[in-house]
Image: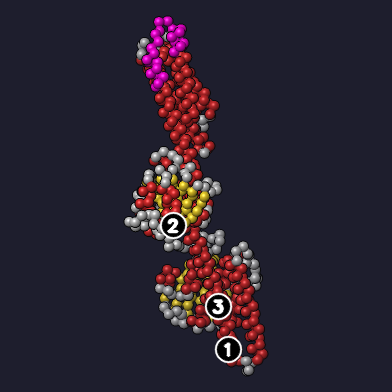
Amino acid sequence: MDLSRHLAASRSDRIIGLVRLPLAAMIILAVWLDPAQPTRLHSTTYVVLQLYALFAASGAALLLRHSPRPVLALAAHLTDLGVFTFLVFTTDGPTSPFFLLYTFSIISAAFRWRWRGALWTSIAVLMLLVVSAFVFYRFVPGSIFETDRFLVRCAHVGATGGLLVYFAYHQDRIAEETRRFRPPKTGPWYETERTDFLAKCAAHVAQTFHASGVVIAMDDSEEPSAGAYIWQNGNLAVERIDPAVFGRMTATVASSPVWTGSQAEWRDMTRLDDGPAESPDKGKLAEFGADLAGHRTLLSVPVPGEYARGRMFIAKPGGHGWDAAIMAEILGRQIGEGLDQIEVSSIQNRAIDVEARLSLARDLHDGILQTLAGTALQLENLARDVEARPETVRARIAMLQDWLVGEQREVRKLIRRLRPGQAEGSDTAYDGQAGTGELARRLCDQWGIAVVAEEPPIDLEALPDIRHHLFQIIREATANAVRHGDATRVHVSFDDSPNGLRLRIADNGRGLAQHGTFDQAEAASRNIGPRSLRERVTGIGGTLSISSSELGTELDILLPVPGKGRTG
């Protein structure tokens, strides 16, 4: 608020200084064109006016190059009053036409110091009029005191000053009310729960308008009835409203501020049917409806919003007529915007929860589920060899135990990820130093095929998120190649790209049901390729293209890497 006033005062000083220059020039021209003026102190008057013009020119030049100073503004204001008073004295005294120059001083004071400046300048001008008239008629021979003209000029100063005082005061009051409507650092605007927000808004509105009662009636998508948030005599309450009552409250009233002045109108608005509103089975609204209906003035404004609709009722609001209505309408819109923000935040939180569940589902599918599937396949093979090759079976069982221990660590890691505030740690299904080569050896043992994986051209240990997604992609792609393509060999290679890390996974299986090359959009629209892989790559901002033929399938994946360009 102080910065805003300082900025307004600085701009006012600049405007006043620029207007002062042509005003000084016009004064000199007016005096020069009238041969009868000045009537006394002729030479001195011209010298004073020339100095005033020089002062105005210097001030205008200074204001164009530098920020105005409050002390200089006060000095310039006093200079204006002094020069105007001297000019009035030397040109016919109280009857001088240059009397109107005082209006410039009063207007300038209103611009610069708001209503206080206009008030004190008006008082100063009235005192100068009285003093100059006394001096003029006391010491100038032959002068005659014209009472009517003197009173008219005093009335002119009083009326002009009074209007400017009121105008400036009104502007300050509007600025203060606008400041009160801005969301404060504390209060209802920072609530995240709908009920708490509306209850505190009802109290905030009552405090703003010094009202004896406030009702905010809003629909609720999660409830069969609407809600009434009531502030009455310092107490907050929340009640449910019958849908029919709520419909009458919001649908039969105009979408603009409405003043209601009688109990009958309130009962008309809240009744359920053509019967009387007081019927005991007509809903809970009768309890507070009767209380507010007793007030002589009741202001009703809409509470608009994207996700909710409602109306606010204020009993005996402080203010005058449409001033109060406009302020209430502003608050109603703010309440609607606050409700929209709460709903948007809730939607975002739900979306985050859904994405977290999808991420968990992908990790379970691409990692643990594939390992369990491979384990089941190995157990099936072991069942056939248990009698013929017992030593081999024991070794394979030990390997399967290692796999299951690794998956236990993977499950624990996923559980930690679901617990807020806990770090994932380094306890993963693969050793912290293990690379893609070690992953390939594990997949060879798991699926009984040849898996060859190059080492990527970047340090995966410094990028744990990329490493996690990369390993899961390789595991899922290998499982799909074996289970759905009957592949016996998988080759994993990497290229360093300006846009990230390019990963290619090729197998020698029989390919997909559809042969050809498909980009990410076409694969998604035609549901070609593994859905889990598409969702994972898309979720981290990467791209995926698929090439399929009777000779096998190749996945071309571009993964975004921090510090590199965006994927295209």
| Label 1 secondary element | helix
Q: Position of residue 507 (x, y in %)?
A: 51, 79
**CA gap, disc 3 and disc 1:** 19 Å
For image coordinates 36% across by 54% down, the residue present is 276
Q: Would residue 440 be seen by someone viewing this image from the given angle?
A: yes
In which quarter of the view is residue 410 placed? bottom right
Q: Residue furthest top?
A: 141
How dense is the environment of label 2, judged by Cα within 10 Å: few (below 14), some, or many (20 and up)?
some
| Label 3 secondary element | helix
| Closer-to-camera residue (278/254) | 278
Closer to the chain start, of discs 2 and 1, is: 2
How dense is the environment of label 1, judged by Cα within 10 Å: few (below 14), some, or many (20 and up)?
few
- Range shown magenta: 133-156
| Closer-to-camera residue (192/381) | 192
**CA gap, disc 2 and disc 3:** 55 Å
Q: Would residue 104 be seen by someone viewing this image from the given angle?
A: no
Q: Which residue is mark 2?
A: 284
User: Nearer the observer, disc 3 or disc 1?
Assistant: 3
| Amino acid at pointer 3 | Leu
Q: Is residue 156 left or right of residue 418?
A: left
Q: Which residue is mark 3?
A: 369
Q: Which residue is mark 1?
A: 381
| Closer-to-camera residue (45/78) | 78
